[in-house]
Every structure is written in C-alpha cells, then in structure tokens.
Image (spheres, grey):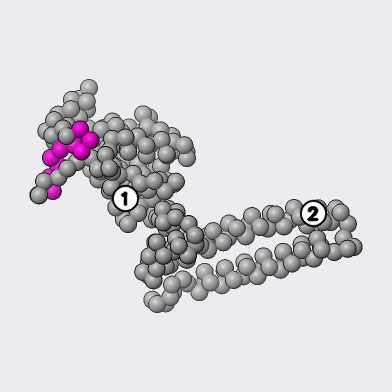
C-alpha cells in the first residue's frame, strides 16, 4: 500500500467487487418481485433471498465502515467527532468501532508480571479495546478507568491478582466473571465500582500515589490493607 493511500488497493477492489455482486443479485430478485408472470412460490423465494442478501450486505458495509473509520483516524484526515457527525452516530460508537485490540500474553504461568501487565491480560480476556492507547473500553463502549494503570489498581483491590511478591500464575481466574458478553460488562462494572471519576489515586507532584480518590485513605493505609488480604 502506498504511504499516502488511506486504504489498500486490495481492500478497494474487494469492496467494489462485493458491491457489484450485491447489485447484480438484488436486481434479479427485484425483477422477480415486480414481474406479472412469476409464481407466488418464486416471489416467496425471491423475498427470502433478498433478506439474506441484505443481511450479508449490511455486514459487509459494517466492515467497510470500520475500515474507513480506521483510515480516517489513522491518517488524521478526520477526528472522531467529525466521523461521528458524518455517520449520524455518537463519538463513543466510533471509538468502540475503531478501538485497538489489547496486546497481552496469552499465558501468565511462570512469568512475573506487573499489575498493569496483568490488567492487559484481563482486558484481552474480556474483549476490551484500547481508546487512545491508554483507556480500556468495553464492547458496549463504556470506559474502564481513566487509564489501564487505574484499572489495574481496582483489579488488585478486587482480589483478581495474587500477591506479586510470591511465585504464582498472577491472575485468579476462578473468582472472576465469565468472558461472555454479560461477564465482560459485569467485570467492567466491578472495576468501575472501585474508582471515582475513573481514578483510583490522587498523585503528588512527583507522580507518586498519595490518597485513594473515593475515600481519601492514604497510600500506606491501602497498601497495608491489601497486604493483609494477600497474606490470608
């Protein structure tokens, strides 16, 4: 693909070919439905085939829209808000469609990971995406914390991580919600329940955590509470 091209020629050709096939087939079905000589059974079949074709075409157009949204955002030709206005949808819808998949290891066994790295593994498990490269976003477009580090603190408090000072697989999968759509949203809501305004900590000028946002407990208090829990 040319450095200046928004989409590849292969994508272009594939989209145009599919559209031409859709136009050709729908023309046949419409000719049948508007015919005075076609039988009722033929018209019935034409209707069923038309609906199936429309469903396939809609899925193809959705894929094309995602491709063009990514092209517009990655090239910075249009902003998320401008694309949303053009399509008549919300900006959160565009963010959800254009979110980057969370990159994370598939297996954590035998590997020491930080809380933020384990949060990435959890996000991948639940099918969350990354917005602006920093915020987890659920499949329904809801944000999970101001950034992945804040979400990781919440996951730690929920007990989803083993004590990182001890050898372990890191993540306590059995106590967490399932990875289906309902479980994914439940997990996100549990994380949000530990945050306030998307944040877990207030930070000092040196970017060190000082107070937990939702209850103003100090860092040392929270650390002691979590350490006691981890040792149980």
| Tag 2 secondary structure | helix
Residue 171 in view here: no
Total marks drawn?
2
Left or right of 102? Residue 87 is right
User: In the rendered image of this protein, does residue 119 appear above or below residue 14?
Assistant: above
- Can you tell which quarter of the image residue 160 is in? top left
**Highlighted range, magenta:** 206-215
Mark on residue 112?
none
Q: Is residue 100 above or below residue 159?
A: below
Q: Residue at x 50, y 74 (%)?
A: 9
Quarter holding residue 16? bottom right
Q: Position of residue 170 (x, y in %)?
A: 28, 36
Give how far across and how far down residue 6 sits, in percent: 43, 72
Q: Nearer the viewer, residue 214 or 189?
A: 214
Q: Is residue 196 above or below residue 102?
A: above
- Give residue 135's mark: 1
Residue displayed at 62% across by 66% down: 18
The residue where tag 2 is placed is 45
Q: Earlier in the sequence, mark 2 or mark 1?
A: 2
| Quadrant in which the C terminus is drawn | top left
| Alpha carbons under labels 2 and 1: distance apart | 48 Å
In the image, residue 137 lies at what x, y percent?
A: 37, 48
Bin the neighbour count of mark 1 within 10 Å (Cα to Cα): few under 14, some 14-19, many 20 and up: many
Q: Is residue 200 left or right of residue 100?
A: left
Residue depicted at 58% across the width and 57% down the height: 59
Q: Say what secondary structure mark 1 lies in.
A: strand
Residue 94 seen by the camera: yes
Residue at image position (33%, 44%) is: 144
């Amino acid at each position: 693909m040319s450095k200046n091209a928004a989409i590849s020629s292969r994508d272009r050709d594939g989209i145009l070919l599919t559209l031409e096939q859709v136009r050709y087939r729908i023309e046949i079905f419409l000719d049948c439905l508007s015919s005075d000589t076609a039988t009722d059974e033929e018209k019935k079949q034409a209707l069923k085939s038309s609906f199936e074709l429309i469903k396939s075409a809609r899925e193809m157009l959705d894929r094309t829209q995602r491709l063009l949204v990514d092209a517009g955002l990655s090239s910075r030709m249009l902003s998320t808000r401008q694309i949303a206005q053009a399509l008549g949808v919300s900006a959160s819808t565009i963010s959800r469609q254009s979110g980057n998949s969370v990159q994370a290891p598939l297996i954590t066994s035998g590997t020491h990971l930080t809380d933020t790295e384990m949060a990435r593994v959890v996000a991948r498990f639940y099918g969350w995406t990354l917005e602006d490269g920093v915020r987890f976003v659920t499949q329904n477009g809801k944000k999970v914390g101001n950034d992945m580090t804040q979400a990781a603190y919440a996951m730690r408090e929920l007990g989803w991580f083993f004590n990182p000072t001890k050898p372990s697989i890191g993540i306590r999968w059995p106590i967490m919600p399932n990875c289906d759509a309902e479980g994914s949203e439940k997990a996100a809501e549990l994380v949000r329940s530990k945050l306030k305004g998307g944040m877990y900590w207030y930070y000092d000028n040196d970017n060190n955590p000082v107070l937990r946002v939702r209850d103003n407990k100090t860092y040392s208090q929270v650390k002691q509470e979590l350490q006691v829990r981890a040792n149980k």
